[in-house]
Every structure is written in structure tokens, then in C-alpha cells.
Amino acid sequence: MTIDWNAFTPWSSLVGGALIGLSALLLLHANGRIAGISGILGGLLRPSQGDHRWRVAFVLGLVAAPLLWALVTNLPPLIIDADWPLLIIAGLLVGVSTRYGSGCTSGHGVCGVSRLSPRSLVATAAFMTSGFVTVFVARHTMGGIL
């Protein structure tokens, strides 16, 4: 994946980040729930009484939002420079890590850090450090595969 720095739009990025924060805040205040995607999807796989509708609405919103946005503007092309086996392994690693870490990057990074949750602060520091190290190693010791 590459970033086209000439087309970088800081204002739309700022607005997008503010909307993510606002939606997380609204979900917390309206339902008392944390907007962590893994927890929301996990709850759909093992639904409890009265807990199903808001989860379905949340996931449908995640799917519908870019589709509606595509009606207003042209979306950038989606280019994935990896083959299927690598994507499947990466997805499984993310899933296992999410269960092991008691949440995903959105739950810990957006919601947990904003609540100053010690567990989320440690988790966010850990996955950010892991990402930095992975990119450094891949770019500087493995011939720049990233």
C-alpha cells in the first residue's frame, strides 16, 4: 500500500477522525457500549437477548457508509499487493490477537485511550510499537518489501 502524498487531504482526514470520535462517544452515551469492532461482531456471533439490533445497525452502517459516499464522490482505487494465502494468514493472526488482547485497535486505540484505560494504553503502545518495528525491519533489513 502506498500513500499519494500529493493527494493527501488533511481537512477531510481531520473531519473523518472527529466523526469517528463523535460516533464512539454517541454509542457510549446512548448504549453504554464501547465501539470496538471485534466486540460488536463477536456479540453478533453469540447474541444475547435484546443486544442484537444495535450491533446489526452498527455493522450495516459500516458497510453502507462507503457505499453511500461512493454516490457522492469517486472513491480511490483499492489496490492490495498481497496474495490470498497471506491475506488469510494475516486475518487469522488479527482475529486471534484481538481475542488474546481483549479487543481490537478501534476499541483500545479510539475508545480505551480516550477513557485513559490502563489496559488500552498498554495495548495501544504495544500494537503501535509492533507496527513501527515491523515496517522498519521489512523496509531496512528485508529489501523493502513494504
Image (cartoon, rainbow, N blue to C red):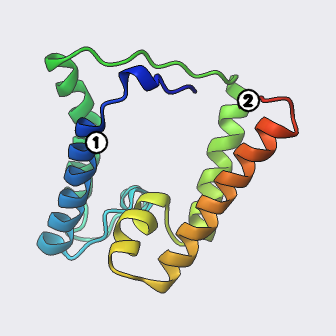
In-front residue for pair 3/27: 3
Q: Earlier in the sequence, mark 1 or mark 2?
A: 1
10 Å neighbourhood of mark 2: few (<14), some, or many (≥20)? Answer: few
To which quarter of the image does residue 74 belong?
top left
**Residue at numbered disc 1:** 62
In-front residue for pair 105/62: 105
In-front residue for pair 125/40: 125
Circle 1 — which element?
helix
Q: Vertical placement of 38 versus 91: above or below?
A: below
Q: Vertical placement of 121 versus 40: above or below?
A: below
To which quarter of the image does residue 144 belong?
top right
- Report the quarter where the N terminus lies: top right
Q: Amino acid at mark 2?
A: Pro
Image x and y of residue 135, in percent: 70, 44
- Report the quarter where the C terminus lies: top right
Residue at image coords 56%, 25%: 2
- On the picture, is 130 further left or further right than 67? right
